[in-house]
Image: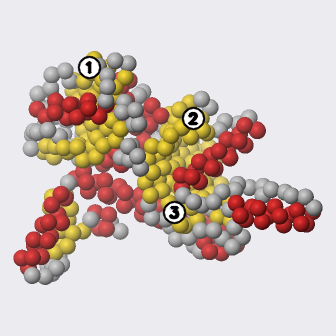
Amino acid sequence: MGRASWVLPLVLFAVLASAAPADAQPQVPPGYQLLTAPQVTGGHLVATRQGSGSATTLLGLALKEVAGFFDQRPQAVGGARDAADQQAEAVFRATLRGSSVGGIAYAFVGKGTGTTGFVFDSPQTLRQSLPRLLSLAGGGRGPAPASAQNWRETPFPDGSGSMQLPEGWVITFAHKGMASAKGPHGWIERGLVMQVKTRAAAAQYSALVQGAIGQPKPWPGPVADPTDPVTVLQELTARAKAQGQQTGTPSETILRIIEVAPVSPAPGFQQAAYIDYDVDIGGVRCRLLRFLMLSHVGPDGLWIPYSTYVGSPADAFPQNLPVLLQVWGSARTAQYVIDEKLGEALQSLREVGAIARQTAQTRDRSQQRIHDKWTEVMRGTRIVEDTLTGERRDVDLGYSHEIVRRLNEGAGTDRYREIPLWQLNQ
């Protein structure tokens, strides 16, 4: 996955991290400021210094510098950096006056200066306060996002579903479960599907038409092979760009792939992945997080890519992502639309089976598993169960496997077992 293989998990870790209350404020390290705001709980330790070089090195130095603020040096449990090593982030765990602490640390270098920061808050309020806490450092992490208030259940105009939207957001398009919405935090495109022909099937189509009318005619729709999600994304984006140039409409140019996280696909699909990437849209650098599934190929060479994504200007993406994820997770499709899509899919792709019905359910389960795994890591605990008595207790995640092994050795049977959080929530 490359050097930035933790970027997507970092964002989700930051949303779910455990932290101590902000009113526990030990001695601030020299050169640092502890930034707080009356509107939110939590805090943001930040420092700026002269110099340049490696953001990773600077982040390692910062972890040592703040050891006196926390009870001990924070423990990094995952990290990422960009290709030039000018930006680095890490999820950390520590204790603060005896309370469990978790959060996100970052370092940026450039133009002769380096900036480091540590963001933390209680687990009950971090989801709401994270954007505001990140914005307290000014321009170091991009502009402050608009607040997300007055959430409301908003039905799609065609009655095919709904999603929860905060104030300032509007639904711009809806058709049979597909929907688009935008607001001050970015935008979401939900439930996008199309029919794509494989290259071999498209060539066969052209040959059949030529035999019938005496001249070749290319397949009018998109042509691509379902090789892997990233390749398909690149090919379909390039096709959309070519069409945009012909019609004069804005189009996307992929600038870099930041993170690819494969997940289990829904029945009827062969591959699925979350893709975190940067694009140029009309001269503006934006960042998108896309969930893309590739179906099996039908007898006629047709297959379906299913896609949902959220996007924002790149410099504000970390701050806006919690709101975008909340909008994303709230989207619902009406049952009659799922049934109708099922019928349409079975007519054109007999092998797909219950494609539409399973898509929404499997997507939700995949997202829940990902959130549960990040939550478990940040809590640092895992449930161990006594299968004879049914008693359950939390143990240290780093030693859970060894604890179960020793308990079973002492009992002489496989009486104890680990229960990961994502399995518990199935």
Quarter of the rendering containing residue 334:
bottom right
Give the camera-side residue of 402 and 32. Answer: 402
Q: Is residue 117 visible?
A: no
**Label 1 or label 3, whichever comes before in sequence order:** 1
How packed mark 2 is, by other alpha carbons closer than 10 Å (few <14, some 14-19, many 20 or more), is: some
Q: Quadrant of the C terminus?
A: bottom left
Give left or right: position of 395 versus 11: left
Numbered circle sitting on residue 49: 1
**Label 3 or label 2, whichever comes before in sequence order:** 3
Q: Secondary structure at mark 1?
A: strand
Give left or right: position of 278 versus 399: right
Q: Residue at x 29, y 34 (%)?
A: 56
User: How far is disc 1 from disc 3 in space, using C-alphas?
Assistant: 46 Å
| Type of amino acid under label 3 | Gln
How packed mark 3 is, by other alpha carbons closer than 10 Å (few <14, some 14-19, many 20 or more), is: many
Q: Residue at x 16, y 43 (%)?
A: 94
Q: Secondary structure at mark 2?
A: strand
Residue 88, given in percent of the width and then of the height, sits at 33, 35
Residue 123, given in percent of the width and then of the height, sits at 25, 47
Q: Which residue is mark 3?
A: 271
Give the camera-side residue of 413 and 329. Answer: 413
Numbered circle sitting on residue 280: 2
